[in-house]
Image (spheres, rainbow, N blue to C red):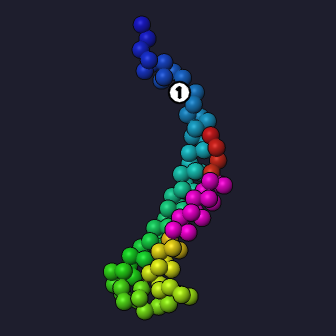
């Protein structure tokens, strides 16, 4: 008698060709966007660690740099997510 796992393996045998065609471009796009956000976050953390006085000293409009940069990170994450959703190829 066949086990459920062997049925699942047989049904997935035809799937890798369709799946592999989209994995590489989507993974590359996601990794590139992750690296962009990582650079933004590393900049934020570098200021926090090495020059934390800068966060309070610099005014960006009515708020200091820490608040502006923090909201900028949140906005950047949302924008990158929307870009990824737009360019990500469906399976």
- Say which residue appears at 38% left-offset and 76% top-offset: 45
Specify whether 32 is left or right of 48.
right
Residues in magenta, as a range:
74-87
- Say which residue appears at 53% left-offset and 74% top-offset: 72
Q: Which residue is mark 1?
A: 12
Specify whether 47 is left or right of 79.
left
- In the image, residue 64 sits, relative to residue 82, either above or below, namely below
- Say which residue appears at 50% left-offset and 62% top-offset: 34
Q: Residue furthest front?
A: 62
Q: Is 36 colored magenta in this rendering?
A: no
Give coordinates of residue 4: x percent, y percent.
44, 17
Give coordinates of residue 66: x percent, y percent.
44, 81
Q: Main secondary structure of the magenta part?
A: helix
Q: Is residue 10 visible?
A: yes
The number of numbered badges drawn on the structure is: 1
- In the image, residue 78 sits, relative to residue 85, either above or below, namely below
Query: Quarter holding the N terminus?
Result: top left
Q: Which quarter of the picture shows residue 14?
A: top right
Give coordinates of residue 6: x percent, y percent.
44, 18
Q: Nearer the viewer, residue 79 or 29?
A: 79
Query: Quarter holding the C terminus?
Result: top right
Specify whether 53 is left or right of 67.
left
- Say which residue appears at 36% left-offset and 80% top-offset: 48
Give coordinates of residue 12: x percent, y percent.
53, 27
Q: Is residue 43 visible?
A: no
Q: Which quarter of the picture shows residue 84?
A: bottom right
Q: Residue furthest left?
A: 49
Q: Secondary structure at mark 1?
A: helix
């Amino acid at each position: 008698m066949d086990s459920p796992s062997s049925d699942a393996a047989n049904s997935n045998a035809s799937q890798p060709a369709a799946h592999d065609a989209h994995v590489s471009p989507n993974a590359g796009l996601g990794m590139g966007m992750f690296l962009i956000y990582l650079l933004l976050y590393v900049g934020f953390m570098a200021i926090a660690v090495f020059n934390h006085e800068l966060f309070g000293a610099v005014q960006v409009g009515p708020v200091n740099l820490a608040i502006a940069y923090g909201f900028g990170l949140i906005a950047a994450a949302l924008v990158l997510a929307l870009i990824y959703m737009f360019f990500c190829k469906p399976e």
